[in-house]
Amino acid sequence: MRPPVDFVLQEGKQTLLTQILPAIESSHFQGSIYVIGILLAYAALEYERGADIRVTDNAELRALFLAAAERVADVALAIRLRQAAAIREASLRMSELDRVNDLLKSQFIELHEHVEACSTDWALDFERRMLDFLASSLARRALPGIGT
């Protein structure tokens, strides 16, 4: 039997916070154990949902780039947007998903700067779409309160 990683991390957190923490007298060490326990809980959460968050973000960024490439007047920017939309992950390893996400977010920043500098109707509407993406991405990453 192979226990799921998130289960192992959550059990480690539970053991630290319910069995080890109460047995420690030093408030300094209690604080350290509490922090380690919470970090284990967040690591379990990241293990469970981290790839999904990054894959979703990357797909949404690609869609934004392709939509913007059809509207921007700057031909060089449109080319860079299409090139960025064509970037694909070589694997589903977290490091690879993060690498691609970082590249796409760099292009997102350039696009956002361009859109903010434009005063056309499409740019104003598109900026709202970009802000909606940021809000959705942030919501996907929200950390729930993890107590004992």
Image: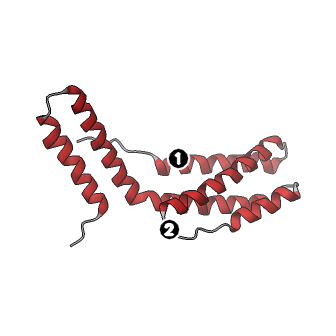
Residue 65 in view of the camera: yes
Q: From the top left corner, tell me how far across and down residue 94 is, in percent.
A: 48, 60
Q: From the top left corner, tell me how far across and down residue 17 is, in percent.
A: 20, 41
Where on the picture, by quarter, is residue 82? bottom right
Is 41 on the left-hand or right-hand side of 112? left
Q: Amino acid at mark 1?
A: Leu
Q: Quadrant of the C terminus?
A: top left
C-alpha gap between disc 2 and disc 1: 21 Å
Position above or below: 28 against 1 = above
Q: Which residue is mark 1?
A: 138
**59 or 17: nearer the viewer:** 17
Disc 2 versus disc 1: nearer the observer: 2
Q: Which residue is mark 2?
A: 92
Q: Are marks 2 and 1 in contact (CB under 8 Å)?
A: no
Q: Kindly state the secondary structure of the residue where label 2 is placed.
A: loop
Q: Residue at x 24, y 27 (%)?
A: 28
Q: Residue at x 54, y 63 (%)?
A: 96
Q: Kindly state the secondary structure of the residue where label 1 is placed.
A: helix
For marks 2 and 1 on the same chain, the one whose residue lies earlier in the sequence? 2
Q: Amino acid at mark 2?
A: Leu
